[in-house]
Each structure stands twice: as C-alpha cells, then as structure tokens.
Image: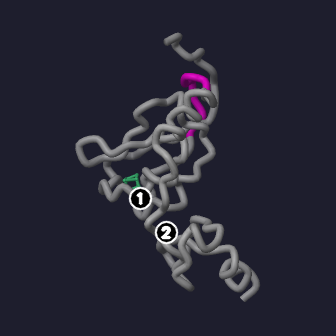
Amino acid sequence: MAKPAMVKRKIVKINEDLCDGCGACVTPCAEGAIQLVDGKAKVVREELCDGAGFCMGVCPTGALTIEEREAPAFDPKAAKEVQAARGKPILKETCFRCGATEEDAVLFPCRHQGESRWVCVHCLPPLIHG
Ligand code: SF4
C-alpha cells in the first residue's frame, strides 16, 4: 500500500488529558478514523480523517478540536473501504427532545445547556426559533 502524500490540511486533534474514554465520538466518525485505544480516543489512521469535525459536537468534555497541520492527505477510497467493512453503524444516541433514533429522522449533534446532545430534524426548529 502506497503511503499517502503529506499535505497541509485540517484534521482532528484529541486532547488526551480531557478525553474520558466515553467512546461517543467513535460511531459518528463515518470514516472510522477514531478508535478507543487503552481507554482514550485516538485518530488511528490520519488518512481516514476528513477534518469535517462531526465528532466534535458529541464530545462531552471538549477534548476534540480541529487543527491545521501537515498530515497524510485524506483518502476517500480507503474511507469507503472502511465504511463498507463496518457495515451501517447505527447511533445508540437519540434525539434528546423526542427520543427519535437516526432510523426515525436525521439527527444532528448539538450543544445545549452545557451538554453535548443529539437533536432530530423535527425538534431543531423550535430550538432555533424558540
Ligand atoms: S467523545 Fe470526547 S471524551 Fe468521549 S472518547 Fe471521544 S474524545 Fe474522548
């Protein structure tokens, strides 16, 4: 397997001091870049992290940020292969307002009253408009 080229780009950064190993960021990472290793989240294959930051919204401790640095280029082909091998991971989290699962509605990670939560597409507008 050829080594991915190094490029300057955005990639997830994990603060291990803040990470409590809850694992909430693993499933939302569709590309499978994040895994728990010895009780801490790690970007196990940097070429699988697209830097989109979808994981950030679900971290309850603020351990995840995005940084810009030299890293292996994102490899969409490898990410697709990992996704195919994983099958369809279904989030165990549900909408904090109505309990909808991701099979019921589109879910978004959000921050609400100091907590990381998920909200469904139906319950999001009342949160925005009051
Ligand atoms: S969601 Fe945050 S605290 Fe939980 S495992 Fe991931 S980085 Fe660590």
Residue drawn at 65 percent across, 67 percent down: 106
Q: Position of residue 98 (x, y in %)?
A: 56, 85
Q: Amino acid at mark 1?
A: Ala
**Rendering quadrant holding ligand 1:** bottom left
Q: CA distance from mark 1 to mark 2?
A: 10 Å
17 left or right, relative to 97: left
The image quadrant where one finds the C terminus is bottom right
Q: Which of 122/111 is in front?
A: 122
Q: Position of residue 14 (x, y in %)?
A: 42, 44
Residue drawn at 58 percent across, 53 percent down: 54
45 left or right, relative to 97: left
Could you say whether the residue bearing mark 2 is in a helix, strand or loop? strand
The correct choice, above or below, for 16 with respect to 75 in the image is below
Q: Residue furthest left?
A: 38
Tell whether circle 1 marks a residue whose Cβ is less than 8 angstroms from ligand 1. Answer: yes
Q: Which residues are magenta?
A: 67-73
Of discs 1 and 2, which sits in the foreground? 1
In the rendered structure, find residue 74 and report the number of the disc placed on it. Answer: none
> CB atoms at circles 1 and 2 under 8 Å apart?
yes
Q: Position of residue 78 (x, y in %)?
A: 55, 28
